[in-house]
Image (spheres, grey):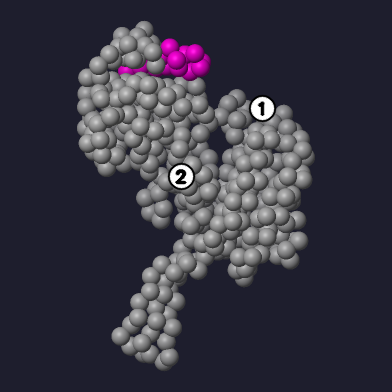
Amino acid sequence: MNTLLSIETRNAVLLRMAELLEQERANIIAINKTDLDAYDGDDISMFDRLKVDDAKVDEMIKAATHLASQKDPVGVERFSFKHDNGMQVYNKTASFGTVLIIYESRPDVTVEAAGIAFKSGNKILLKGGKESLRSNLKIVELWHQALKEQDASKDWVEYLQFNRTETQTFLEKPTQRLDLIVPRGGERLIAFVKQHATCPVIVSGRGNNFVYVHKEADLDIALDVIMNGKSKISACNAVDKVLIDENLPNKGEFVKRLISKLKDFKIEVLGDETISKENGLEAITSDDIWYEEFLDYKILIGEIASNQDTIDMINKYSGGHSSSIITTNETAAKTFMENVDTAAVYHNASTRFTDGGQLGLGGELAISTDKLHQRGPIGLQHLVTNKWYVHGNGQIR
């Protein structure tokens, strides 16, 4: 096991990483282009996540710089207690040890998620998808250079070039110590990791997020929030389902406005029985579609009787990620927010804010839909476990 690197060394590596990303910007983008050209799939959201342009490099640099400026998450005192017998007891945060990040298509994860795990004192194992291999290897090369320049072992960041079978074997029988696994990708990847892993897994779950337009909604806000929710279809915080209160005044007119705006943006609009009949839309043939995360230019609009019915519907069908109520009624908003079982609940705001950077964490390792350990965006301060430090002078029980 690697001895914990001092916070000065960890920060110096991150700052050097930011400089190297800037220096190698053109190379990274050119190498990424070979990954993009080689991608032969038809998954548009995968292609979107695979792409590295100037803006993506800027984000990576910002993430590394910001991480270097944050407080050390390791060794933070969480609790202290003086025992009757004179022992001094502390509980402090501690690093996990070795974190494996398994991810699809997103080369920025190689900087952002790895950076968070590194700053919190962990050794990083990276297993990216084959579609982004060249981009990932280039970025890992920069990690190694930054580590070497600070006299730190290259082992702190290791890239695993495994195929699916080798990955499965490694998950079932790791050839080195493994304390935590973070899968970043679709439901198939997460299911695969959960099935085979022999250590804890942080589940970065699916989206399938809902917006509820309450009968006392400000309709301009409703329109903006729904449209913004569809502004990036590859994001797990995108909106897939819209529920409209049947008692909304001018409901028909609002739905028509919404549908026409969505169609302007080439978004396919589906409706439940009522909405499709009233607006000449394609009707859904099975309620199972309410469970589906689209990751596509597609949205489903339905009519709902009440706030309580909405809460029940979201709790049944959503991915446990994000949901939003649009209303001017504070009591209705409070009831919705307290009872909807998603990691983030919004009142008159877009679900697109479920993101570590946007919620003040500076970045995120993943967005967890699990309830244990940490729920929602997992920032630097959450990627730690804890440890008891007990100081005595010969006490026995």
What quarter of the picture does the C terminus occupy? bottom left
Residue 66 in the magenta stretch? The answer is no
Q: In front: 3, or 263?
A: 263
Residue 170, given in percent of the width and then of the height, sits at 58, 54
Instruction: Count numbered badges in the picture.
Output: 2
Question: Is 185 placed above or below 212 here?
Answer: below
Q: CA distance from mark 2 to mark 1?
A: 35 Å
- Give the mark, 2 or 1, whose residue is nearer the N terminus: 1
The image shows residue 83 at horizontal and vertical percentages of 33, 82
- Badge 2 local density, few (<14 within 10 Å), some, or many (20+)? few
Which residues make up the magenta segment? 259-273
Image position of 131 with respect to 268: above or below: below
**Residue 231: percent from the left, percent from the top?**
50, 26
Q: Which residue is mark 1?
A: 40
Magenta residue check for 270: yes
Amino acid at the residue labelled 1: Asp
The N terminus lies in quadrant = bottom right
The dot on residue 359 is: 2
Residue at point 44%, 83% (across, down): 391
Residue at screen point 42% across, 87% down: 392
Q: Is there any visible trace of residue 231 in the rendered image? A: yes
Classify residue 41 as left or right of residue 145: left
Please tell me which residue is depicted at 38% across the width and 74% down the height of the picture: 80
Looking at the picture, how far across and down is residue 259, in whole percent? 40, 14
Can you say whether 249 is above or below 168 in the image? Answer: above
User: Circle 2 sits in a helix, a strand or a loop, which is it?
Assistant: loop
SS label for mark 1: loop
